[in-house]
Image (cartoon, rainbow, N blue to C red):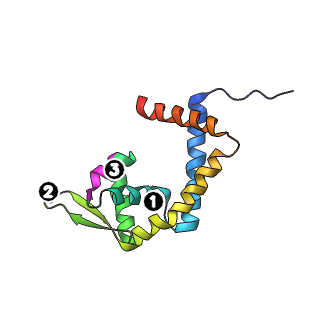
Amino acid sequence: MVEQMDQRLFYLLNIARHKVYKYADQQSEDALGVSVTQLGALMLIDQDDGCLLKDVAKRLHLNNSALTGLATRMVQNGLVERRACDKDGRASRLHLTELGRSKIEEAKPLITQLNAVMKEGFSEDEVQVILRFLNRLVTAF
């Protein structure tokens, strides 16, 4: 008897996101000593060094208070520097430190490995369908 595959998209996306995030976070902590959220923030800051704290919050889909805590931990761990914005003293700009830059470089093989693990068991054509599906969800909602 063949077991029927679960067809509940919302449920499966939610469970898959949770499991993949948890796995990636553990791998990042073990290999780099930083959370996957910190790594995501480092990569965003690297693309726009000196960006505003609120812009990182928006791109990571975090509320401002969550990002304030994240930024504080990253400063304490020597990954970023936080400086007042010249144009608005109430705003903060984030700048990578050398340690922050090195964590990004150290993460590249880990990211490649995580993507490979997620693609296991799928043909390249199937991966393209999955990517199209996920990109559609990102843009549709």
**Residue at horizontal 38 percent and vertical 66 percent from the top:** 74
Mark 3: secondary structure: helix
Task: Specify the amino acid type for callout 1.
Answer: Leu
In the image, which residues are magenta?
Answer: 51-58
112, 86: nearer the viewer = 112
Task: Specify the amino acid type for callout 3.
Answer: Ala
**Residue at horizontal 45 percent and vertical 64 percent from the top:** 104
Q: Give the x, y percent position of residue 2.
A: 83, 28
The answer to whether any part of residue 90 appears in the image is yes
Q: Give the x, y percent position of residue 80.
A: 34, 67
Mark 1: secondary structure: helix
**Which quadrant: the N terminus?**
top right
Judge whether 37 appears above or below 3 on screen. Answer: below
What is the distance, in whole Å, between disc 2 and disc 1 at their CAs?
27 Å
Q: Classify residue 29 as left or right of residue 91.
A: right
Residue annotated with mark 1: 39
Residue 57 tag number:
3
119, 20: nearer the viewer = 119
Q: Give the x, y percent position of residue 69.
A: 36, 59
Q: Is residue 129 magenta?
A: no
The answer to whether any part of residue 141 appears in the image is no
Q: How many marks?
A: 3
Mark 2: secondary structure: loop
**Residue at horizontal 23 percent and vertical 59 percent from the top:** 92
Q: Give the x, y percent position of residue 114.
A: 59, 53
Q: Classify residue 33 as left or right of residue 90.
A: right
Residue annotated with mark 2: 88
Q: Earlier in the sequence, mark 1 or mark 3?
A: 1
